[in-house]
Structures are given as C-alpha cells and as structure tokens.
Image (spheres, rainbow, N blue to C red):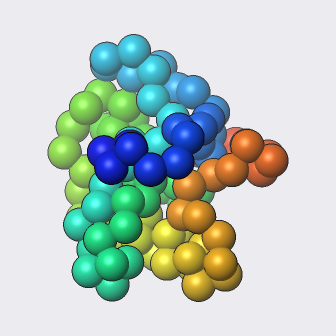
Amino acid sequence: RYAGEGVKGQGYFGMQPAADGYSSEISAEDNPSLRNQEYPLMVPGISREELEMLLLGRQPTPSIFDKARAHAQKRIAAGMSPFAQPSELHYPVPK
C-alpha cells in the first residue's frame, strides 16, 4: 500500500501470479468521495479479463476503478476497511 497504512494482506482472491511476482490487492487512492483513502483494485465484481490486465501491470480501466470504488464505498459505509481482512474467506478468482 502506498501510504503504508495497515498490514498488506492476501486480498480477496489470495496471492495471484503477476508480471512482477505476485499481487493480492493493487491499491489506488484517487477518489475524493473516499477522502483519498486507499482501496484495492482487485475486488469481487471485476472480470477475469480485468484481473489479468491488473496482474500484467496494465493501466486500470475506468470500469475497474468504478467497480473498486463502489466496493470500497460499500465497505466503508458498513464501518469496514476497503481491504480484505485476514479473517475473511477468499472469493473465487473470476472465471
């Protein structure tokens, strides 16, 4: 995580092979409605193609950002971190 806040976890899908090793979250922080709080881009709701783009190090699409922001906003509104917590079960990797 860019800000160094919190302990980096396994993310929603666990550790995934990426162009530069492994990734589990891929953070962003570009949304004033989230008070510029970091949030993960690898979230439930993205497609397999979108996940692969992120893992290859490509620029996230507007669709990826929209899905990740919506997911983060929902969790923050519920009083939760936008990032998956160690006690949460992993989601299936998108097919």
Q: Residue at x 56, y 76 (%)?
A: 76
Image quarter (top left, top right, bottom left or bottom right) of the C terminus: top right
Check the image and report above or below for 32 versus 10. Answer: below
How many marks are shown on the rendered structure? 0
Q: Residue at x 39, y 44 (%)?
A: 4
Can residue 67 be seen from the camera position used here?
no
| Image-based side of 70 in relation to 50, left or right | right
Q: Position of residue 31 (x, y in %)?
A: 27, 74
Q: Nearer the viewer, residue 81 or 41?
A: 81
Q: Residue at x 67, y 81 (%)?
A: 78
Q: Position of residue 73 (x, y in %)?
A: 49, 78
Q: Nearer the viewer, residue 71 or 7?
A: 7
Q: Position of residue 19 (x, y in %)?
A: 31, 19
Q: Nearer the viewer, residue 51 or 90?
A: 90
Q: Residue at x 33, y 39 (%)?
A: 54
Can residue 22 be seen from the camera position used here?
yes
Q: Residue furthest top?
A: 21
Check the image and report above or below for 49 versus 39. Answer: above
Check the image and report above or below for 12 versus 69. Answer: above
Check the image and report above or below for 27 versus 70. Answer: above
Q: Position of residue 1 (x, y in %)?
A: 38, 43
| Image-based side of 12 in relation to 50, left or right | right
